[in-house]
Image (cartoon, rainbow, N blue to C red):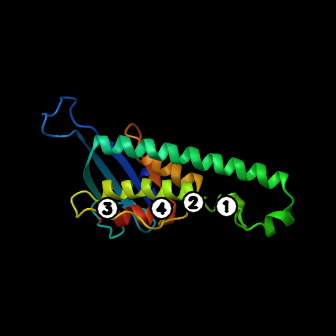
Amino acid sequence: ESKAARAQEKEISIQWYIPSVAKPSKDTETKVLLLYAYNINPVKVGDIAIFSTSVFSGHLWIPLAGIISVREKLSHLKEQVEILIQGSKNFATSVPTSFLEQSETWKISFTNKPKMGLWRLDEKTEEIAKRCLSEVKALLSVGRALSSPLTEIPFDVTLQTIKNLEDMFNLASGCIITEENLLDWIISLLH
């Protein structure tokens, strides 16, 4: 059965449409169209004439300059996270466990489930993440009152969630996001 005919879990699909290559007038900024569709429950499409209350779609015009800026910042954030992860792995393998348990100054720590990649950010990277996610929030909240900056990060930051956000703003390919907290946050911004 085709993946296009079913969604096994909650997910959002993001695609971009860049209209004509003709230059807009000096008074207007270049915008691209964000196309999205998401489901909140598993879905199997059997008959397209049947309405599903679990599937939603929409679009949003977003300034190209904003997309480029956010993507660059997400790329920088991803690099910072990769450096922190690599540093924590090197530190964890070179320092006895008893020291890690006693250290109160240790800023990055893996949880009991390291395979999921959950860890705490250091203050500098957390501030970078808040600014970056505030910009994402502002872009996806177009047409509403100015959005306020984030005071806390609305989902668990993992390398995968940052990669997914970076992919989301890739105009060439778009993406599908399934991480629940990230997905819920994005959906809340689109409505």
Residue type, label 2: Glu
Q: Earlier in the sequence, mark 4 or mark 2?
A: 2
Q: Residue at x 27, y 57 (%)?
A: 58
Q: Which mark is residue 123?
A: 2
55 or 146, nearer to the observer: 146
Q: Earlier in the sequence, mark 3 or mark 2?
A: 2
Residue type, label 4: Leu
Element type at mark 3: helix
13 or 121, nearer to the observer: 121
Q: Is residue 71 left or right of residue 21?
A: right
Residue 2 visible here: no
The quadrant holding residue 122 is bottom right
Q: Earlier in the sequence, mark 1 or mark 3?
A: 1
Between the C-alphas of marks 1 and 3, the distance is 33 Å
Q: Which mark is residue 107?
A: 1
Q: Is the residue 23 above or below the residue 175 in the image?
A: above
Q: Earlier in the sequence, mark 4 or mark 3?
A: 4
Residue type, label 1: Lys
Q: Which residue is mark 3?
A: 190
Between the C-alphas of marks 4 and 2, the distance is 21 Å
Q: Is residue 99 left or right of residue 123?
A: right
Q: Position of residue 134 (x, y in %)?
A: 39, 58
Between the C-alphas of marks 1 and 2, the distance is 8 Å
Q: Which residue is mark 4?
A: 182
Element type at mark 2: helix
Element type at mark 1: loop
